[in-house]
Amino acid sequence: MKRRPFSLLAIAIWLAGLASAQAADPVNVYSIWPENYARPMFQEFEKATGIKVNFIRFSSGEALARVIAEKNNPRIDVLFGGPVETFAAGIKEGIFQPYKSPSFDKLPTRFKHADGQWTAIADDPLVFMTNAAFLKGKSLKAPASWDDLLDPAYKNQLQMADARTSGTAVTRIFSVLEVNKRDEEKTFAYLKKLRQNVQLYTKSGGGGTLPVGLGQAGGGIFFIVDALETKAKGYDVVISFPKEGIGSSAEAIALIKGAKNPEGGKKLIDFATSAAMQSKLSEHKVNFVPASPDVKTDPALAEVLKGANIFPIDDEYAGANRKRIVDRWVKEVLGPQ
Amino acid sequence: MASVSIRLDGVSKRFDHTVKGEVYAVRQVSLSVATGELLTLLGPSGCGKSTTLRMIAGFEEPDEGAISIDGRDVTHMLPNQRGIGFVFQNYALFPHLSIFENVAYGLRVQGKPAAEIVRAVGEVLELVGLAKYERQQPHQLSGGEQQRVALARAVVFHPKVLLFDEPLSNLDAKLRVEMREQIRALQKRIGITTVYVTHDQEEAMAISDRIAVMERGEVVQDGTAEDLYYRPRTEFVARFIGRTNLLTARVVSAGEVEVEGVRLALAARKPAGERVTLVVRPEMIALLPDAQGAGRIVQRTFLGEKTDYQVALGGAVLQVTAGGEPIARLLAPGSRVAVRIASENVHILS
Amino acid sequence: MATRGLASETRRLLRDPALLGAVAVLWLLLAFFVLYPVAELLVRAFSDEGRFTLEPLLGSLADSHHRAAFVNSLILAGTVGVLGTLLGFLFAMTATRAGLGRRWLTALDAATLLPLVSPPFTISIAIVFSFGPKGFISHDLLGLDDISAYGFWSTALAETLTYFPIAYLTLRPIIAAIDSNLEEMAFSLGGSRWRIFRTVTVPLAVPGFANAFLLLFAASLADFATPLILAGNSFSVLPTQAYLQITGMFDFKGGAVLSLMLLVPAAAVYLLQRYWVGRRVYVTVTGKVGQRSRSRAIAPWAAVLLAVATALVAVAILYFYALLLYASVVVAFGANNSFTWQHYHVIFTEGLPAIRDTLIIALIGMPLGGLYGVLVGYLIARRRFPGRQAMEIVSMINYALPGTIVGIAYLIAFNDPPVALTGGALIIVACYVFRYSPTGIRATVALLQQIDRSLEEASASLGAGSGQTFRRVTLPLIAPAFFAGLGVVFIRSMTAISATIFLVSLSWTLITVRILENMTELALGPAAAFSVFVIVVVFAVVSGLSALLLRLRTPMAGAAARSLLGG
C-alpha cells in the first residue's frame, strides 16, 4: 500500500520525461491550415530536408491563444498558416522571433512584415459560396454584392465563422470595413442587418462549408480554399464575388521566440516561403494563391478568380484594431438578437 | 500459583452519543486472567463486554487505564503486534480464500516456510475435525464448520491469548452445546489463556473457569459459576444467572425473618424491622400439598424431567421447580400448598 | 457514534507506517493535482498585478451577455434535469414493471448504454442531420422547410438523450426494490393501481428523482460540446462561453471568472446531493434486478403503453447511431452516398497517432484511477485518521467541478516550470484520474459498507499490518469496485473532452479532440468513423469487465457490474 503510490509517481515522472525528450530533433508546429493542406507540405519538407514535422491543427484563435499561454515555455518552433492579422495580433504579445528567409526580399511588401516577424506563404481571398439547389429553389442569382446577402430570401440561411475563434471571420469583418471606407458605424449597421440572415456562426472558418454543400444552409462567406475544397468533394455549390470587392488575407508563417529548435524552424520557413513548396500547392490541390512571384497560380484557380475585385487587408490597421473590433462585434452583433 | 497473563487496570472507554452526550461503554474495569485460565465476560447486550474484549484485542483503544499481556504493556499497541487469536461472532472467514488459506493466513503473514504451513494447518484442521475440507470455500461449509475453521485459524499460530466474541450465537441450540464443549476441550488441551464473551449464562457456566458479570460498563461480580449462582452480590447478578426468586423480607429478630407470613430462621445481621432481599432459587423451595397451606398453585408447566410451578404466596408469586416426581405427586393448579424453604438455601443480599 | 479524540487518532496514525505513508502520499497528490490548480485559477481570477480585486468578477456580472449565458445554463440544466429524469423514470418503469423478457431487457440496456459510452457530439450531429434544414426527418420525411436545428430545444433534446441513462441507472434499482412488498401490499388492501402509483411508488422514488435530477443538472451544466455544436447564436451557455473566451479571445481572466460563475451552481448541486438527497434514499439497492416476473401492480394496458413509449425512445436512439454508422461508410454524407471504407482507412493511418495516444492514456489512467479510487475509498470508509473528512471532500472537487474549469485550471497551473506538465501525457492522465475516479471511490465506500469490519480485524489479529491487510483481504474483496472505477476511467478517457481539450498537445492528442476538429472542418466521415471506433472499443472493454466481474463471484460483483456506468 505504501509502495504503490510511489511507483505511480515514478510512472508519472517517466511520462513527463518522455514527453519532453521527444521535442529534441523534429520541428514542432501549430498549423492553422487544416491537416489535409498542411500534411502534404510537411511531407514534402521532410522529403527535402529529412527533418520531421510534429504538428497539431488549431483554428487561428485557438493557436494564437495557446502560443501566448505558452510564452514562458514555448512548446513549438513555428506557427504555420493562418491569416496575417492573426500574426499581427501575435506581434503585440511578443511571441515571434524575427527571421528573414532567402525568399524574403523577392516578396511584395504586403506579403511580409518589415522586420521579418512573419512572412507570407500564400494568399487567400474570401468568396461568397452558395448552394446551387438553394439558389434555384428561391429563383436567386448567385450574390454579386454585399447587399444581396441582406435579401430576406437568405433569412436564417447563412453560415459563417465566429470572430472569436476564426481568422476567416476577422478577415470578413475587415473586408466590410474596407468596403465602407473604414466607417465603423456603417460597417456595424451592415453587420447587424446581416446577422438577421445568419443561421449559425461556426467555430472554424470552414465550419459552414459542409452545411452549405449539403443544403442545410443556403450560403456563406468563406476562404476560397475551403470553397473549392467543398466543390471538389462533389457538393454542388456556386462561388461568386461582390462587386464592391472582398478582402484577401495572406497566409503567413513565423518563428516562435524561444523555440527549442530554431534551426529546424528556420529551415521550415525557408522551405515554406520558397517557390519549391508553393509550386507543390497545385499538385496537392491546395487552392491557395502562391505568394511567391516565381510560382504561377494554378490555371483552374486563376479561372475562378478572373474578374474578381479582390483587395488586400491592411495588416497594420487590422492588427492594431483587431481586439477592439472583435469585442465590438461580440457585443453588438453576436450578443443581442 | 498460576501467573497472571492478562491484566486490565482501571480501563475505560467513552463514546459520543448523539442524544446522551458522552457515555461510558466501559468504566473503570480492572480484571486479571491467569495463564491457562478461561474467563468469561457475561452480561446483557450493551453492557460493555464486547468493547472490553475489543480493547484487549487492540481493535479499540482505551481512553483511560492500562492493559498488559504477559507483563508487557499493550495499551496502545496495534492489534497485529499483540499475539492474540480472535474468534468472531460472524466467523469472519475470508470469503475469497479456501479453508486451507484461511487457516494458513496468520502463518503466511509471519512468512513461515511452506512446508511448515502445510504441516501446521493440517494438524489444526485435524484437531477441529475438518481435515478433509482444506480445498473448500467458506460458503460451502455449515455454520458450525465455519466456526471451527475460525477457531483453527485463531489458534494455528500459537497466540498468547485467545479471545472469543459471542462465537456461538449464530448457531442453533443443539450445535451450540456441542461446540462449546469442543471449544472448552481444545482450550484445555492447549492450555491457552482465554477470554470469552457471551450473553448466555448457561454457556458461560458450562465453559468457564471464572465469570465476570458486567452491567452498564462495569464488572459487578467476578467469580466461579458456583459463587455467582449461590452468592450473587447484587440483584442484577441474581436475576441474570439462572432463574431466581427475589423476596423482600422483614427482619423479625437477630435469627429470624418473615416473608409473606412465612417465618425463616436466618441471621440477617440487620436490626429488627429492617427489610432485606432474599435470593431463593426455584429448585430450593419445597411444596407440600396442604389444604390449609399459605400458598396456592397458579400455574403448572410440565417439562418432563422437571415441573415448573408458579405459586402465589401472600402478595408475591414464587417460581418453584420440582424435579423427577411421580405423576401422582404433581400438584394441580388451584390447589393449596405449604411452602418450605430451608434456611441454608437462602442467600441474603447485602 | 463517533470515537472521540483527535489526539488518539493522530497517535494511531503515527504508529502505523503503512497508513501514514498512504495518507501522506495521497494528500501530496491531492494537493498537487486538485488544490493547487484550483488555487491558481482563483488567484488568476481575483488578482491584478499582485493585488486582490473583484473587478473582473463584477465586470463579468455586469456584462449582460455573460449574465444571459449564466441564466441560460441554469435553464438548460433544469430542463435537461426534468426531461432526463422523466425519461429515465419511463425506462426504469418499463424495465421493472412491464414484464419484458430477458432479451428485451438486454436490448433496452444496450440502447441506454450507447449514449453513455459515446463521444460527446454524436447525438448533436445526428440531430443536425435529422432535424436541421434539409434534415432526413424534418425535410425528407415531414417536408418542413426553414427549420433551424440550432437553439435551446435541440440542445436540450440532445443533452436529454445523452444523459438520461444516468437517471435510468439511478432510478431502476430503487423502483425495482419498491414493488414487491409495498405496492403489492397496497394492492391487496384494495387500492387502485393508479392510486398506488401516486401514493406509494412515486413518493418512495422521490429521493431517487431528486438524485437523478441533480446528476443530470450537473452533467448538463458541465457540458460544453453539445452547446458548441447546437446552441447556435442566440442561446449561449457558460461552459462554451468560457471556452471561447480563453481559446478565442485569449482572455484567461475572463474565462476563469466565467468558470467560477459556473462553480456556484455546481457546488450547490454537489452539496445538495451529498448532504440532503444522499441521506434520504429509503430503499437500499440490492442489485437483484431483472429476474422479477410481471408485477401485478400495473395494469396490462399500462405495461404495453410503457413498453411502446420506451421502445420509441430506444428506436430513436438506435436511429441516431445507425445514422452515425452510415455516415462512417459513405463517401460524403448527404452528397455522395456510395459505400466506402475510406474513412476507416483515414483514421487508422492519419488518425492512428490519436488512436494510439488515446489508448495509451486510457490504459495508463485505467489502473491508476482504479487503484486511487479503492485506496481513497478504503481510507475514508475504514480508517480513522485526522483530516479524513477533508480528504473525502477534496477528492470529490475535480469531479464536482465542470470539466471546463478543471481543464483551464490545469492549463494555468501546469504550463510554466518548475511544474511544466502541459504538452505531456501525464497531465491528461492526471486529469482523468482525479476527475473520474470518484465513481470508483464511491463504489468502494458502498462496497465496504457491506463488508463486515471484522474481516479486517481478523486479519489484524492474525498479525497482518494495515498494509498487508489491505493487500491480502480488503483489495481482493473490493475488486468489483476497483474494476468499476477502472472501467469508468477508461470510458471517460475514451469519450471525454470538456477538460482535456485544453490539455492536448503536439505529442499527445486525443480521439475526441480529433472528432471535434474533423467536424469543424469538412470531414464528417472520419468523425463518424472515429466515433464508431470509440463506441466499439468501449463496448468491448465494458463487456469484458462485466464478464470478469461476474466471474469474481463476490456477492457484490453483480451490483458493481451494473453500477459500472452509474456515475
Image (spheres, coloured by chain):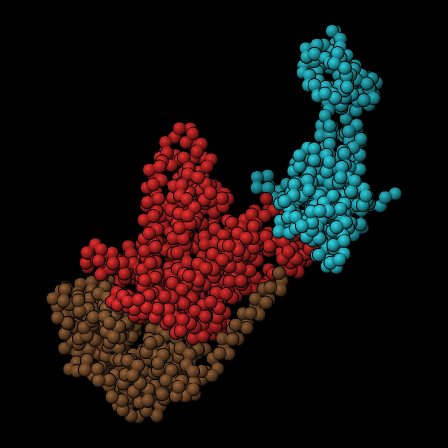
Q: Could you say which quadrant of the image residue C320 lies in? A: bottom left
Residue that appears at 77% across and 29% down: B229
Nearer the observer, B26 or B334: B334
Quadrant the C terminus of chain C occupies: bottom left
Q: Colour of chain A?
A: brown
Can residue C127 be seen here? The reply is yes
Q: Could you say which quadrant of the image residue C175 lies in? A: top left
Give left or right: position of C335 versus B180. left
Give left or right: position of B84 versus C380. right
Among the chains pictured, the one given red colouring is: C
Can residue A193 be seen here? The reply is no
Rendered location of residue B209, percent (x, y):
80, 37
Residue that appears at 74% across and 6% down: B291
Q: Colour of chain B?
A: cyan
Residue that appears at 74% across and 51% down: B121
Q: Residue furthest top?
A: B291
Rendered location of residue B26, percent (x, y):
69, 41
Quadrant the N terminus of chain C occupies: top right
Rendered location of residue B69, percent (x, y):
78, 49
Q: How many marks?
A: 0
Q: Residue furthest right?
A: B1
Rendered location of residue B30, percent (x, y):
76, 42
Position above or below: C416 against C308: below
Residue that appears at 19% across and 80% down: A304
Nearer the observer, A4 or A225: A225
